[in-house]
Image (cartoon, rainbow, N blue to C red):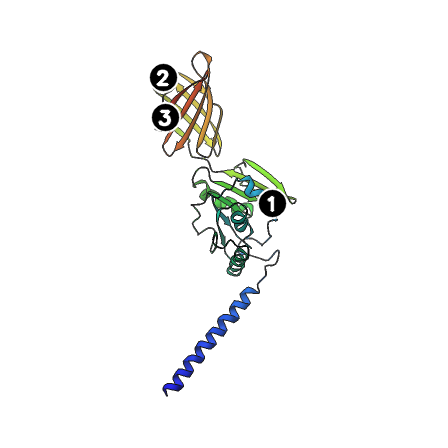
Amino acid sequence: MNIANNLFSVLLILIGLLGNLSAHAADDSFQPIRGQPGKDVIWIPTPPALVTAMLSMAKVTPSDVVYDLGAGDGIIAITAAKQFGARSFGIEYDEKMAQFARRNAQQAGVADKVKIIHGDIFVEDFSQASVVTLYLLPSLNLKLRPTILQMKPGTRVVAHAFDMGDWEPDQTAQAAGASAFMWTVPAYVEGEWEVKGLPGAASARLSLRQSFQRIGGNLHLAGYSQPLLGARIEGGQLSFQFMGPNNSLQSVTVTVNGAAMSGSVKANYDANSIEAKRL
């Protein structure tokens, strides 16, 4: 009886191994088809030349963490690792496609630097990314936009083909007959700030209005108000000019750190350190 039971157990194990081998062979045979349906979009591969242009526009380096939202065959994550040395992740909803992308990373020799996640881009956490890439419909870009705008200032976002609505891109690129757009996540600075260190004023009040990377507002100091000139924010750096005492043009550049700013004001080749805090 024991011999029969042992033989039966061995047989079950062999059947299981054969099943696993068969499933693995079936997985290995999967090949995506251009235009195949996905969860929210059909699969259209991004041309390799545009992938390189997108990552070059974002100035990807080995210190970056790249997340590709909707990884498909893994070409963007793989290129980010192989050509630019970055650590990269791809999020792909279709399990077979995710497995296919993992095999591609293995074949490209970058499986140690590329991780393909089988998951939903609206569920998975990509907040650690310094670069985000995507090739989605405009409606999906807009759905992701609030999440992206909460990311660390300076995060670069690059999209193939489609824009982000009224959030104007900072740069564009073309390759292989296709277009890409890039945005830099700006720090949130709208509101009232107390500024110290400006020449001729113990303190001043800075009133800022913001529409993504576009900035407007006024500086109130020494009993008068001046409009900001050429104001702009790039990532976490805010810059503007204003007319100071005696109609001297003064240039301010500060780095935003949450509810505080620090930097300098320059006028007539002189520079002073300044700081600000949100009121």
Question: Element under label 3?
Answer: strand
Question: Element under label 1?
Answer: helix
The x and y percentages for residue 167 are: 52, 37
At label 3, the amino acid type is Glu
The x and y percentages for residue 92 are: 50, 55
Q: Is residue 126 above or below residue 193?
A: below
Q: Mark 1 points at which residue?
A: 50
Q: Which of 103 and 155 is in front in this view?
A: 103
The x and y percentages for residue 54 are: 56, 43
- Classify mark 2: residues with Cα within 10 Å, few (<14), some (14-19) or many (20+): few
Indicate left or right for 181 with 11 as reference: right
The x and y percentages for residue 13 are: 44, 76
At label 2, the amino acid type is Ala
Q: Name the residue under label 2.
A: 201
Q: In which quarter of the image is the N terminus?
A: bottom left
Which label sits in the foreground, 1 or 2?
1
Identified at 63% across, 43% down, the residue is: 175
Q: Name the residue under label 3.
A: 275
Q: How far apart are marks 1 and 2 (CA)?
A: 51 Å
